[in-house]
Image (cartoon, rainbow, N blue to C red):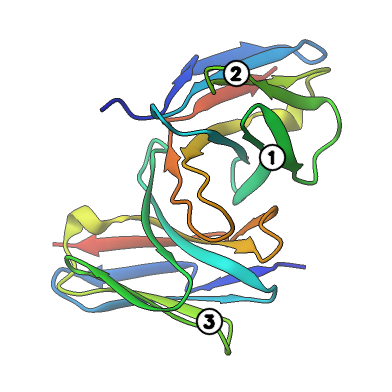
Amino acid sequence: EAGVTQSPTHLIKTRGQQATLRCSPISGHTSVYWYQQALGLGLQFLLWYDEGEERNRGNFPPRFSGRQFPNYSSELNVNALELEDSALYLCASSLYTGFYTDTQYFGPGTRLTVL
Amino acid sequence: KNEVEQSPQNLTAQEGEFITINCSYSVGISALHWLQQHPGGGIVSLFMLSSGKKKHGRLIATINIQEKHSSLHITASHPRDSAVYICAVREVTGNQFYFGTGTSLTVIP
């Protein structure tokens, strides 16, 4: 069974540009989570999508947005890129079984560099 | 303020040693996760706990909900265990996730 896939692996942009990152969840998983891991910092929760809807977002400005498609794949868009947006962006997927139990399976990440 | 605190930040052990990594959290949670991140970024979910204890091979994870504390133990450590171990909690509302800054483990042969 294929795991979570992300594309591209690496992305280099300049300040002010827009970046689009993509994630394909494990087949059958309806929830997709996005996380940011900046150099020297821990993981931070960005966004959670389930069944096509944004369920919650972390403490990030509105220029971080995304969507989930009918096939449950997801896109993360970062507008007006800033240097501090340089980070590893990780996607994870899970079966949303309710309140308590959803083990998340992580993709390999997209490394975004903003010059 | 950090909702999740891990200790130690860095840990070096000799092969074969018993290792403990601790995690304390300050919010009400529905679940606690232990993650393993290898150099290069790949993350593997090791355990998800809401109570008690879980064991998988040489790894054991425990959680004390009343004390808001969890531990990850590695028995008979091996160099391939070298990685960053991250504690993460899902807030009881179900909608927010908080992460510790990770414990960097190096196991020396």
Q: Residues within 10 Å of mark 3 (few under 14, many from 20)?
A: some
Which quarter shows the N terminus of chain B? bottom right
What SS does tag 1 mark?
strand
Residue A63, relative to residue B104: is it above or below?
above
The kind of secondary structure element at disc 2 is strand
In the rendered structure, which amino acid carries the disc numbered 2?
Answer: Leu
- Picture disc at residue B69: 3
The kind of residue tagged 3 is His
Q: Residue furthest bottom?
A: B66
- The subunit letter for the residue under badge 3 reads B
> What residue is drawn where x is 80% and y is 46%?
A59
Residue drawn at the location 62% of the way across and 38% of the way down: A36
- Say which element carries label 3: strand
Which of disc 2 and disc 1 is earlier in sequence?
2
Decide which of B78, A4 is in the foreground and name it.
A4
Whole-percent x, y for residue A48 in the image = 65, 39
Residue under numbered circle 2: A21
Label 2 marks a residue whose chain is A
Q: Position of residue B52 (x, y in %)?
A: 39, 81
- Is residue B70 shown above or below B99? below
- Residue A109 position within the rendered picture, expressed as x and y whole percent measured from the top left: 48, 29
Q: Which residue carries the number 1 mark?
A: A46
Q: Looking at the image, do the residues carrying marks 2 and 3 touch, with CB atoms under 8 Å apart?
A: no
Q: Name the amino acid, label 1.
A: Leu
Distance CA(mark 2)–CA(mark 3): 35 Å
Above or below, A9 against B93 in this view is above
Q: Is residue A106 left or right of residue A58?
A: left
